[in-house]
Image (cartoon, rainbow, N blue to C red):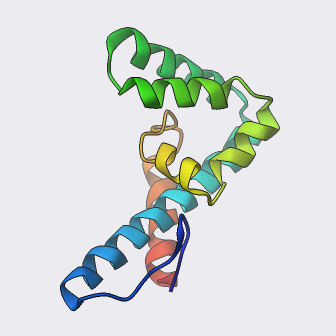
Amino acid sequence: MARPCGGDVVAGPARYASTIVTHALAEERSLALHRAIVEKARLEPALIDRARARVESWGERGEAHPYYVEAWVAVLSKPIDDILDFLVDPGEHACALRQVTPFAGALTARERWRILAGVRKAS
């Protein structure tokens, strides 16, 4: 079974199988949500500015670990096309950063439900 972020799932004891599947599903959902954010940000570039402001706030208030703040500052300082490419990068670094995303709230509840329902049907 291929995982969206980090290679193939290695078969192991049955007690770990549900954890692996659950984690893979969470990664799929996160990637699907960020694909939608990319589409929306192409139409609404202000989403990038809001993400930058959120990361700045995290740093000022200590609301996120400095690793994530620094990593997101580096990503969000790039040209918009590079930022959007990163948001859907299947690599481990992008996958890890999506777990602490400054794009929370970029999608409406209806958009999120539609996407999550699609991921459920596909899995």
Name the quadrant containing residue 46. Answer: top right
Picture coordinates of residue 84, whole percent (x, y): 72, 43
Q: Residue at x 46, y 63 (%)?
A: 27
Q: Position of residue 69 (x, y in %)?
A: 47, 25
Q: Is residue 33 above or below residue 67?
A: below
Classify residue 77 as left or right of residue 109.
Answer: right
Residue ID at (56%, 61%): 32
Q: Nearer the viewer, residue 16 or 52?
A: 16
Q: Residue furthest top?
A: 60
Q: Quadrant of residue 50?
A: top right
Where in the figure is residue 70, as x and y percent of width and height? Answer: 52, 24
Vertical placement of residue 78 versus 107, above or below: above
* Image vertical order of residue 33 relative to residue 122, above or below: above
37 with respect to 101 (left or right): right
User: What is the number of callouts on the image?
Assistant: 0
Q: Is residue 82 left or right of residue 47?
A: right
Identified at 56% across, 69% down, the residue is 4
Q: Position of residue 100 (x, y in %)?
A: 42, 40
Depth check: 52 or 93 in front? 93
Along the viewing direction, whichever of 28 and 8 lies nearer the viewer:
8
Q: Is residue 64 above or below residue 118?
A: above
Residue drawn at x 24%, y 80% is: 16
